[in-house]
Amino acid sequence: MSFRIMPKAAVPDWITWLRSRYRVVGPRQLKDQFVFDEINSPDELSLDYPTSILPPKKYLLPPTEELFQFTTKGMHTKASLEPRPTVIMGVHTCDMHAIQLLDRVHNTGYADQHYQARRQNTYLVSIECLNPCTEHSFCKDMGTLSVPENFDLHLTDLGDEYGVDIGSEKGEELLRGFASVWDPTEEDYRHVNQVMAEKWPRFSYRFNFDVTELPDLLALSTKSSYWNELGDLCLGCGMCTKVCPTCYCFNVKDEVDLSLTEGHRVRIWDSCQVDEFALVAGGHNFRSTRALRQRHRFFRKGKYQLEAYGLIGCVGCGRCAAACLVHITPVKTFNELYRRHKQGEAVEAQS
Ligand code: SF4
Ligand code: SF4
């Protein structure tokens, strides 16, 4: 929509000003890591952070969420829809792509009212990534190194100031009445172009193939012995899915009070990697081995979501790679599948 300049010195006043109107959350330091948390004073906000343990997804899909309350007196239920207007500051572009996927998933078919209510009351302030977050990032391969169009405001660090792209009416609202922003000069535009041109060479490609080949590579790898090797390694702990910005599988539980007359239904994050995830009535487990579950996970990331929603299911944030105690990573997995596929082709050509 439009572009403005905000000096960094004005950011604390802006945060204070936003806090008087909205809940403000963003990256803040916790020992040597960063977490998305409520910002109670401007100095808690760390916009220049590498990555966060959990993605900002937790404000749209909380780890535990009450769906409704019920009482047996007349069998009444009451939906729990009380979203607080929330500004999420400093969202990296990979996490913005993840939110784009979550939006599509939760607005397709049986639209999720709880997600929608939260999302409508969420303001997204993203930030341009100028350096790779960690050694595990592969956003350049996944095409998530530029912000998608779902931001309300998008910040670019220009040294002493931020370039502020305004992407929506909600973004305008976050600046309305705040005096310390101004129109850019020609020099500002030149500076933005220079910063953007300098950032790309800092990121490298990690895949040995183009990401557009990934769905076909996976289809050709359905019977690969590599899934058994991953299954032998995997601990089934579910950490990789817990930290993932695009995972949204959940369990539902009814919690009843001691009188047995009222209670509430809650939705809790679940993981396709834990042993009991696919356990159904009669004791049948339709994904009973870790090999099958690993295969499912990577197919979901590289193929299924794309086919179902038109967006790839992995945004290259690298959180799962950092979290996995046995070093199972998407980059290693996809490159190894590619290597074996190429090797198979070479053997076929020789015979
Ligand atoms: S974090 Fe690693 S060990 Fe744990 S379930 Fe995921 S792949 Fe398996
Ligand atoms: S699969 Fe791993 S790298 Fe991909 S989005 Fe999820 S956590 Fe990030």
Image (cartoon, rainbow, N blue to C red):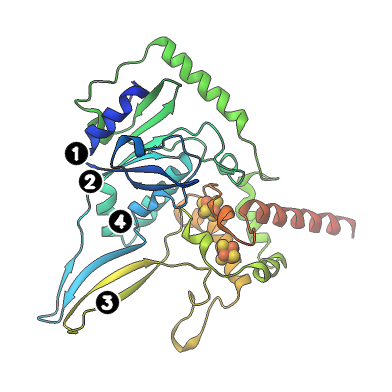
Residue at the location (52% across, 37% down)? 145
For the residues labelled 1 and 2, the Cα–Cα distance comes to 8 Å
Return the x and y of residue 177 as percentages of the image width and height: 19, 25
Q: Which residue is mark 1?
A: 21
For the residues labelled 3 and 2, the Cα–Cα distance comes to 28 Å
| In this picture, residue 55 sits left or right of residue 194 | left
Q: Earlier in the sequence, mark 1 or mark 2?
A: 1
Q: Earlier in the sequence, mark 3 or mark 2?
A: 2
The amino acid pointed to by label 3 is Glu
Q: Which residue is mark 3?
A: 255
Q: Earlier in the sequence, mark 4 or mark 2?
A: 2
Look at the numbered disc 3 and give the secondary structure of its residue: strand
Return the x and y of residue 120 as percentages of the image width and height: 26, 47
Q: Quadrant of residue 163?
A: top left
Q: Earlier in the sequence, mark 3 or mark 4?
A: 4
Cβ at disc 4 under 8 Å from ligand 2: no
For the residues labelled 3 and 4, the Cα–Cα distance comes to 21 Å
Q: Earlier in the sequence, mark 1 or mark 3?
A: 1
Q: Is residue 313 above or below residue 93?
A: below
The amino acid pointed to by label 4 is Tyr
| In this picture, residue 229 sits left or right of residue 59 | right
Q: Which residue is mark 2?
A: 85
Q: Residues within 10 Å of mark 2 (few under 14, many from 20)?
A: some
Q: Quadrant of the N terminus?
A: top left
